[in-house]
């Protein structure tokens, strides 16, 4: 070697073992276990990101995403990154500095939306409910009347609380106030009934690792005609180069202009995840999630445990929040489930820290055998064998 080069520093050249991860059952708020067929697709050999076969696959993904979301929106794509990347894209593209944005906050992810919106220069207003409650359309109407926002942001499935925000009628309400409706569907897409077009949702995003049973790394985004019109009317550039849909849509549209390299194998995985949704059919998939959640709720009740969201019709089938009984250390129970049974569940945070556990039954993991296994393990940890 060239004698003028500095000497190699071997301090970080650690000796590591070949990768071997434990067989965890991921029943927390995400990620959920990927379907075996998705993992298989992930390891398929690569093609280039402008290869005709890849472009064909991109079209298939867009179509299957439109099915999963029940939308005809042209601009329906997976954003490179996790759910938060699509969350950020949804705001970065539709907010212009000075726009009034109203965020309905009833859990952690509403706070995140408000934080992100402010970073893009929005004049952010919020209405708040305690964690576990949902908004009534009349409350939203009063807030729309008061603030006259350009965008209303709501979380369909609040993973921090287990509550399902009913969306019927809200799209129509927003149109009456000339406001775009933006909805976080990260923990609902593929697990909870959701109709983007019929419910007149203008902007929605999701993630790959919750009810779609794909590893984290891609995040679906859909923009309806009213949102695209706002994007096209912008006077200022989208303040985020990587997530700029005016450029990205040229790669996913007919021009196929290079923007950034698509995560090839993650797209293979997402395609397989979406194929599984289409194969099963949305109705059967939603019913499966609901039936397994009800099995869990009944089992928890038998163990003397109460759900945090009392109204069953407002509980998410994909994420159940359970009240921690007095005198029980929530963290210790979760740690024992992981250590003794390879089962991951999560605790609460924010105002619900130490007060709840969060149990996810998402996508491939929403199966009766997983529910029975968890209930048995929970019983042994809480009450002894
Ligand atoms: C998980 C989640 C997100 C963020 O997704 P990441 O993949 O963690 O970036 C956003 N909103 C909700 C409701 C979520 O559950």
Image: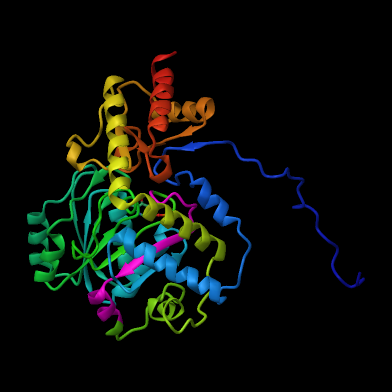
Residue sitting at 34 percent across and 20 percent down? 327
Residue sitting nearer the eye, 64 or 297 = 64
Residue 172 within the magenta-colored segment of the rendering: no
Q: Position of residue 265 (x, y in %)?
A: 56, 61
Residue furthest to the top in view is 385
Residue sitting at 35 percent across and 37 percent down? 358
Vertical arrangement, residue 250 with respect to residue 380, above or below: below
Q: Identify the image quadrant of residue 144.
A: bottom left
17 displayed left or right of 356: right
> Is residue 87 visible to us here?
no
- Stretch of the chain drawn in magenta: 211-231
Q: Identify the image quadrant of residue 146.
A: bottom left
Residue sitting nearer the eye, 8 or 383 = 383
> Is residue 65 visible to us here?
yes
179 displayed left or right of 281: left
Q: How many marks?
A: 0
Q: Position of residue 320 (x, y in %)?
A: 31, 37
Vertical arrangement, residue 383 with respect to residue 162, above or below: above
Q: Position of residue 23 (x, y in %)?
A: 56, 36
* Image quarter in which the C terminus is found: top left
* Image quarter in which the N terminus is found: bottom right
């Amino acid at each position: 070697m060239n004698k003028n080069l500095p000497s190699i520093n071997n301090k970080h050249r650690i000796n590591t073992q070949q990768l071997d991860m434990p067989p965890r059952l991921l029943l927390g708020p995400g990620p959920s276990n990927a379907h075996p067929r998705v993992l298989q697709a992930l390891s398929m050999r690569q093609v280039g990101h402008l290869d005709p076969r890849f472009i064909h696959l991109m079209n298939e993904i867009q179509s299957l995403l439109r099915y999963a979301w029940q939308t005809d929106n042209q601009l329906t794509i997976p954003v490179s990154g996790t759910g938060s990347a699509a969350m950020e894209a949804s705001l970065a593209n539709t907010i212009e500095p000075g726009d009034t944005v109203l965020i309905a906050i009833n859990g952690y992810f509403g706070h995140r939306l408000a934080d992100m919106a402010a970073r893009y220069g929005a004049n952010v207003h919020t209405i708040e409910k305690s964690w576990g409650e949902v908004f009534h359309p009349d409350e939203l109407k009063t807030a729309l009347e008061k603030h006259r926002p350009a965008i209303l942001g709501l979380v369909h499935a609040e993973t921090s609380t287990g509550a399902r925000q009913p969306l019927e009628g809200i799209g129509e309400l927003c149109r009456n106030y000339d406001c775009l409706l933006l909805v976080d569907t990260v923990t609902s897409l593929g697990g909870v009934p959701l109709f983007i077009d019929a419910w007149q949702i203008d902007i929605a995003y999701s993630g790959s690792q919750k009810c779609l049973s794909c590893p984290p790394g891609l995040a679906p985004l859909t923009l309806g005609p009213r949102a695209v019109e706002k994007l096209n009317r912008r006077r200022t550039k989208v303040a985020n180069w990587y997530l700029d849909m005016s450029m990205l849509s040229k790669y996913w549209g007919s021009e196929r202009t290079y923007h950034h390299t698509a995560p090839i194998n993650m797209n293979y995985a997402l395609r397989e995840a979406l194929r599984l949704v289409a194969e099963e059919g949305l109705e059967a998939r939603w019913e499966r999630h609901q039936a397994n959640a009800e099995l869990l709720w009944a089992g928890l009740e038998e163990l003397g445990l109460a759900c945090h969201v009392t109204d069953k019709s407002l509980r998410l089938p994909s994420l159940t929040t359970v009240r921690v009984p007095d005198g029980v250390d929530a963290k210790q129970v979760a740690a024992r489930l992981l250590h003794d049974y390879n089962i991951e569940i999560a605790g609460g945070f924010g105002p619900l820290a130490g007060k709840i556990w969060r149990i996810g039954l998402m996508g491939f993991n929403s199966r009766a055998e997983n529910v029975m296994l968890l209930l048995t393990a929970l019983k042994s940890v809480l009450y002894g064998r």
